[in-house]
Amino acid sequence: MNVWLAMFIIANIFAKMQKKETVLICPLNWGLGHATRDVPIIKQILSEGSKVIIAGSGYSLQFLKNEFPQLQSIELSGFKISYASKQFFLLWILLQLPFFGISIIKEHYQLKKIIKQYKITKVISDNRYGLWNKKIKSVLITHQVFIQLPRSVKVFEPALHWFTRRLITKFDKCWIPDYEDLNTSLSGKLSHGKNLPKNIKYIGPLSRFQNYQPHQEIVIENYPDILAIISGPEPQRTIFEKQLFERFKKSEKAVLMVCGKPSVSIIENHYKNIKKVDHLNSEELYFYLKNCKQIICRSGYSSIMDLHVLNVRAELSPTPGQTEQAYLINWLEKMDHWPLAGN
């Protein structure tokens, strides 16, 4: 073999070995759950030496910016769902579906510009169905392959599952953050069933507290009796906060309410036995979760994965109108080995 050709081949091999990916991570902004479960993925990609750019909007983007201040971030707006405050939950959600479809198309074309501008080589989308591109690798993270509808409109489920499958197969891979064995599954038939898309892969539960090692032991003199973690889309996030405040304002127990509103600075409010904080970083929240005797939170899937990883019990409260959260509580109550206390 010609020595110059051999040198060229070797140089090309080394160039490929040294080439690192530029990965775009994009969580959905429906509460903080989609962002929090992306933390271990970001850490893994960074440990491999690749570049990560985070994209999103609202509280979910601010959360990731707080967790990874060294990373570049992009504002990438998406559909902002809202849940009716009193009644007609389903009707209100159905009326928003056309805007959801428009948002998928819009973010798909936004991604094309981002790929070109930032030289993206791979995109990992957490429940944002428009963020795929034929020119690069694209991964969707979701546990809702088979979305569950209320009984009154159960007849439309097959059509919805067909449509969801079409969206999922646009991606090269679909990562399901759950166990493949239904007997140990956390999400039940939301992610297990017949006619699964061929591109799915079960990757196990995702939690920011996986293999978590605090940088330092945080000294907290008096842990509250009750830790209430508030999250989710408005106006239900605010309604849940008010409900818990009314529930405990005359109690003798000390209550810490974490209000799920990440910001640059942490704002605290006190009312007799109740302390409210906009947000806690992962390290602080870890110690509270491990040491508080009573925990109250929504039954969102990311919260369930956090509790599962930490092996702690909680009182779960579904967001009105989110049939997924109601289903998850029913599913977990059927599993004898499950350590949560669902309400």
Image (cartoon, rainbow, N blue to C red):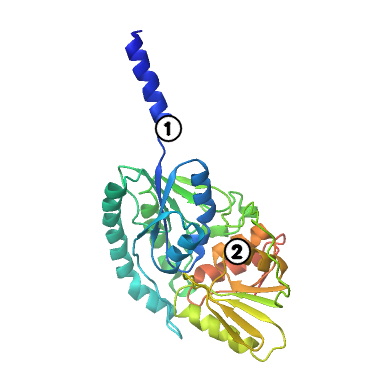
Q: Residue flagged by tag 1: what amino acid is it? A: Gln
Residue at left offset 49%, top offset 51%: 42
Please name whichever residue, 171 or 269, is drawn nearer the observer in this view of the structure.
Answer: 269
Q: Mark 2 falls on what kind of element?
A: helix
Does residue 312 sit above or below 12 in this rendering? below
How many numbered tags mark residues here? 2
Is residue 211 found left or right of 42 in the rendered image?
A: right
The numbered mark at residue 18 is 1
* Mark 1 vs mark 2: in front: 1
Residue at left offset 70%, top offset 77%: 224
The numbered mark at residue 29 is none
Measured as percent of width and height from the top left, residue 271 is found at: 61, 88
Residue matched to label 2: 304
Q: Residue flagged by tag 2: what amino acid is it? A: Ile
- Say which label, 1 or 2, has the lower sequence index: 1
Considering every residue shown, the one lying at the far top of the view is 1
Please name whichever residue, 59 or 295, is drawn nearer the observer in this view of the structure.
Answer: 59
Quadrant, the C terminus: bottom right
Q: Mark 1 falls on what kind of element?
A: helix
Residue at left offset 43%, top offset 54%: 71
